[in-house]
Image (tube, rainbow, N blue to C red):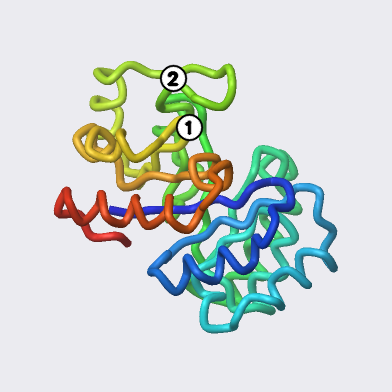
Amino acid sequence: MKLILISSSKSVEKELDILITLFEMGLQTFHLRKPKYSTPKLKRFLQRIPEQYHNRIVIHSHHNLAAKFNLKGIHLTKTHKRKKLKNWLTLFLLSRKKPGLAITTSYTKLGDLFEIEKQYSYIFLSPIFDSSTSKYQAGFTDHSLTGALQKTTYNVIARGGVDIDQIEKVKSLGFYGLAIQSSIWNQEDPVERFRAYFNKFKELGLTVE
């Protein structure tokens, strides 16, 4: 089952050191989401990550960097998808430079799972569970999720309120994987918290992808 880590949108103390340690531990997919970073700042961030891990990184902005750094993919936000012509041109150019680049996006409505605009590598659906760090609540019932996940052609990643205790349920509902963010970055020891996820996957007989 896919385990995706999303960066904090803000700077975190020793963030790069932590991230590199997590890659060494086996993190396979990292979504780099820094909405306030300029292209040069995001470029500098990527330059400080060993090249051997670049193919595990999906960026949420400044998509032109995906080919320059041999990244895993790009994530399209609502803003990107509104600018249809620019978005099409970006995807066209990247597909020429880097065939096989993963393209991902996010949805917040079950109906979106049946709007086949493009066959994304996978999509985030949120919010799945009540959040322990903010006021938002789960947006779907278990019954509606199970039905939608059985019918959609997308690989759907559970996002929003996902923590260690929900891994088994995420699997049973039919998700392709799960995405975590605050449950890692809000911890005093993010590395040990991430290790706990790996251990839970192992306990459940799941392979981290």
Residue 3 locus on image (x, y percent): 38, 53
Can you identify the residue that label 2 sits on?
138
The image quadrant that residue 78 belongs to is top right
Residue 56 locus on image (x, y percent): 49, 69
Above or below 77: residue 120: below
Above or below 52: residue 145: above
Answer left or right for 165 relative to 179: left
Answer left or right for 59 relative to 148: right
Residue type, numbered disc 1: Gly
Q: Is mark 1 on a helix, strand or loop?
A: loop
Can you identify the residue that label 1 sits on?
160
Residue 148 locus on image (x, y percent): 30, 28
Q: Look at 24% across and 25% down and name the residue there.
A: 147
User: What quarter of the picture does the C terminus occupy?
Assistant: bottom left
CB under 8 Å between callouts 1 and 2?
yes
CA distance separating discs 1 and 2: 8 Å
- The answer to which of 125 and 133 lies nearer the viewer is 133
Q: Look at 44% across and 19% down and name the residue there.
A: 138
Above or below 120: residue 174: above
Are there few (<14), some (14-19), or many (20+) residues within 10 Å of tag 1?
A: many
